[in-house]
Amino acid sequence: MGDLGAELVRRARAVGMMLVWRAQSRSTRRVLVTGGRTEDSRGSVLSGQGLQIVTPDGRTVLASRDGFDPDPTLALLDRTIAAATRGGPLGLHRQRVPEMPALSAREIPEGLEAFDRIDPTAAARRLAEIESEIAASVPGVTLRLSFQAEVDAWRILRSDGTDVLYAAPRCTLRVTATSGGDRERHSVAAAVAGPDPALPWSDGPAALLVRRGTAAAELARALPDAPPHPAGTFPLVIDYALAKGLAHEAFGHAAEADGFRSSILARDGRFLAGQTVGAGHVSIVDEPVRGDYAWQPFSANGLRRERATIVDHGRLADALSDPWSAEPGGVRLTGAERAESYRHAPIPRMSNIRIEVDGALPAPGAFDEYGPGELRDLLDRAGILRRHPRIAFLSGYSGGQVNTATGDFVFHCKAIHALGREGTRLHRPAIFSGSMLGALGAIREALGPLLLDAIGTCGKLGQSVPSSGGSHYFLVLDPDPSFRLGGS
């Protein structure tokens, strides 16, 4: 494959074209268990290459093909160069050819050979054991457990001599609990992630999944009997998973430089760096974290991905940019471009995004030790219940969307708990909606250390990539008319 890449680079240079060559090989193994029986067990491999040709006058053409056979690949390069050469009559947009620093680097974690030794039958047995342990504690719910292990390897060459290679291992254990009977049904999910394919057999992660799965099952069983929460504006507590959703959907996508023509964080296509968008003790940071579910050390153009402080103590600072969007957006190049596969065009995306708050109050112990009662006691000790005798706790994140042009968001949580001096009460989940600027400005306190293992899938322009992030254990938002909870 290295010889093929070198020949592609040589041919592109010979005709004065810039080439970016992206070679990918992704192998995935997935096992699904329901009711103690294997419902699905499959493996898949995706491999191929993408070619990006840029002419001296700034016209770009992309092409891709499966596999790495030399002759068809070289023929594809010739056709791609010919199409780029005819870019004017074809109506291709012309843009200044960006300058990109050359880089030669490798990021290959150790132990990847263990992925080849995964035994799906043993994995199914282990999932059945975990399912049985959860079911014994919480009867009357339907459980579905899955294990997925994946290695996503990329090599990126550019005609300026850039040559980067990395492999991203990611494994997940998931459980979904669904309430049974004739009542309204609710499903609640929980997950644990890590880079090691021994995840199901590792004591710590397996025990954490049992704990989270048991809590999910108990919540799914209780929700059908829970009343709806009143609609209105209330003081709120959100956990780190919902905080990740707020950072990702509301600010991360709005800070992607390829969307500045219609972003609330930009004007006339330029990022509003320095503008106040939140409380002065609140920051939003995106950066790759080694071993994380969404780890990606290099961009899809062969740049080192950099830490981007999108909001720095309440003010806009960095954007998520690629070589083609940084200069037009008036921002520095952060190497934020990602692609779902070699078949896709790279676009600015997030990796691990989180909300950080100065002076976070202590929350001893692990996050999963805090149920609604323990959180109520924590808020009481911190004096927050003196300021707000009743607080709505939005637990978990179940998706949402944001209009990045207006900053309006709609999020879904797993449940709502009313917390007060008299105790706690469970309510069914309701829509959390409003203005992203209002929500970020309303963050008053944070409790606990940063926790960044909230995982998900980020969709944009038809592409899906892994996402992750979080915040402190809990964030406290003072009531503000710019956001509200739904209800009946």
Image (cartoon, helix red, strand yellow):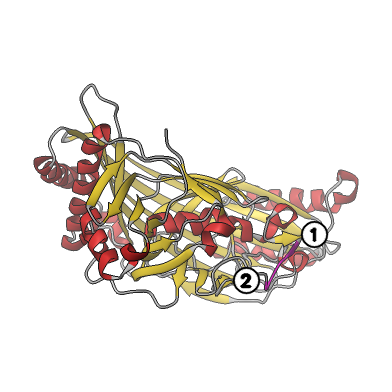
- In the rendered image, the residue lying farthest to the left is 136
Q: Mark 1 is on which residue type?
A: Asp
Residue 286 in picture, x, y percent from top left:
51, 67
Label disc, if present, on residue 268 of the rendered structure: 1
Q: Secondary structure at mark 1?
A: loop
Q: Is residue 271 magenta?
A: yes
Residue 136 in picture, x, y percent from top left:
9, 41
Q: Quadrant of the N terminus?
A: bottom right
Left or right of 313? Residue 243 is left
The residue at which mark 2 appears reads as 318
The answer to which of marks 1 and 2 sits earlier in the sequence is: 1
Q: In terms of depth relative to the viewer, which is nearer, 333 or 318?
A: 318
Main structural element of the magenta stretch: helix, strand or loop?
A: loop
Q: Residue at x 54, y 52 (%)?
A: 481
Start-end of magenta stretch: 270-274
Q: Residue at x 71, y 62 (%)?
A: 19
Structural distance between the alpha carbons of marks 1 and 2: 17 Å
Q: In terms of depth relative to the viewer, which is nearer, 331 or 482?
A: 482
Pointer 1 local density, CA inside 10 Å: few below 14, some 14–19, many at least 20: few
Q: Secondary structure at mark 2?
A: loop
Residue 221 in picture, x, y percent from top left:
21, 36
Q: Mark 2 is on which residue type?
A: Asp
Q: Are marks 1 and 2 in contact (CB under 8 Å)?
A: no
Asked whether residue 12 appears in the rendered view, the answer is yes
Residue 63 in picture, x, y percent from top left:
68, 48
